[in-house]
Amino acid sequence: MVVSVSVVLLLVLLAAMLMRNRSLKPSHAVVCILLGFCLSSTSLAPTIQSTLVSTASLVGTMRP
């Protein structure tokens, strides 16, 4: 668990630094994908999933 938390924190920092650069490169996409895979194996995964589902349902009920 300690290693996965460290990897997640490292990838979050890398993704934040890459986003501040305001240029998207394939390496940035790989870092973000790895961050997603690492987050899916943590205890935050159910919270993230429920937030995304509720946001999607809210957007789906809105009318233009």
Image (tube, rainbow, N blue to C red):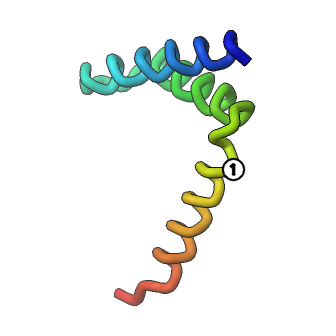
Identify whether 13 is placed above or below 40. above
Q: Residue at x 74, y 31 (%)?
A: 41
Q: Quadrant of the C terminus?
A: bottom left
Q: Is residue 1 left or right of residue 19?
A: right
Residue 29 vs residue 16: left or right?
right
Q: Position of residue 16 (x, y in %)?
A: 36, 24
Q: Residue at x 47, y 23 (%)?
A: 12
Which amino acid, mark 1? Pro
Q: Secondary structure at mark 1?
A: helix
How many numbered dots are placed on residues in this image? 1
Quarter-of-image position of residue 40: top right
42 to 64, vertically: above or below: above
Q: Position of residue 4 (x, y in %)?
A: 68, 17
Q: Extreme bottom residue here?
A: 63
Q: Quadrant of residue 42?
A: top right
For disc 1, the marked residue is 46
